[in-house]
Amino acid sequence: MKNPKALKLVDKIISNINAKGIENDTLIEDIKALRAYAIEEEQPLVVKVLRLTYEHIEANGTFLIPMLEDDAFDEDVEEVATTELNPVESLQYVIMLTKNLVNKSNISDLREYKQMLLDY
């Protein structure tokens, strides 16, 4: 994202997750606010991932989507490789991906998270 307020909000969300873990009320409101910035910047992938993320947290009380491995795709295998479930780390990673949308690997990872959230 390009908006300095959005970037500060990303940092705030990460800081709050570090301090409080996945605490629903504040976290969900902050993710919704970040989503509004993504709408302003016309970033439909980010808008969708953030909506799916806060809906997932509301429904489950935590973030049950595992982290992606460094080499998420094997050319021969069409399956997404994931690591052990660490809700805090995985959620932090998803939020951090929104900071740099020029990076193609961030976009790719956001697409993977979107699919995993849809499939959950």
Image: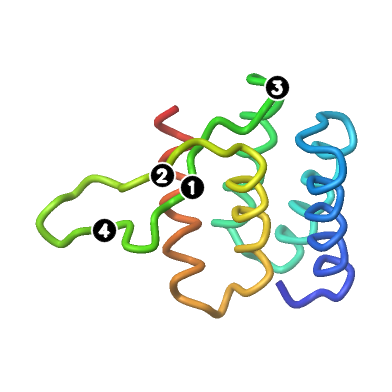
Q: Residue 118, relative to residue 15: is it above or below?
A: above
Mark 4 → mark 2, Cα distance in angstroms = 13 Å
Location of the C terminus (image quadrant): top left
User: Which residue corresponds to mark 4?
Assistant: 73
Q: Amino acid at mark 1?
A: Met
Instruction: Give the secondary structure at mark 4.
Output: loop
Report, in whole angstroms, how far the alpha carbon at label 4 lies from the one at label 3: 29 Å
- Of labels 1 and 2, earlier in sequence is 1
The residue that mark 2 highlights is 83
Pointer 3 or 2: first along the chain:
3
Give left or right: position of 52 versus 3.
left
Q: Is residue 112 above or below residue 119?
A: below
Numbered mark located on residue 61 in the image:
3
The disc, 4 or 2, on the residue closer to the chain's N-terminal end is: 4
Q: Which residue does the image show at 64% across and 20% down from the upper left?
A: 60
Q: Which residue is mark 1?
A: 67
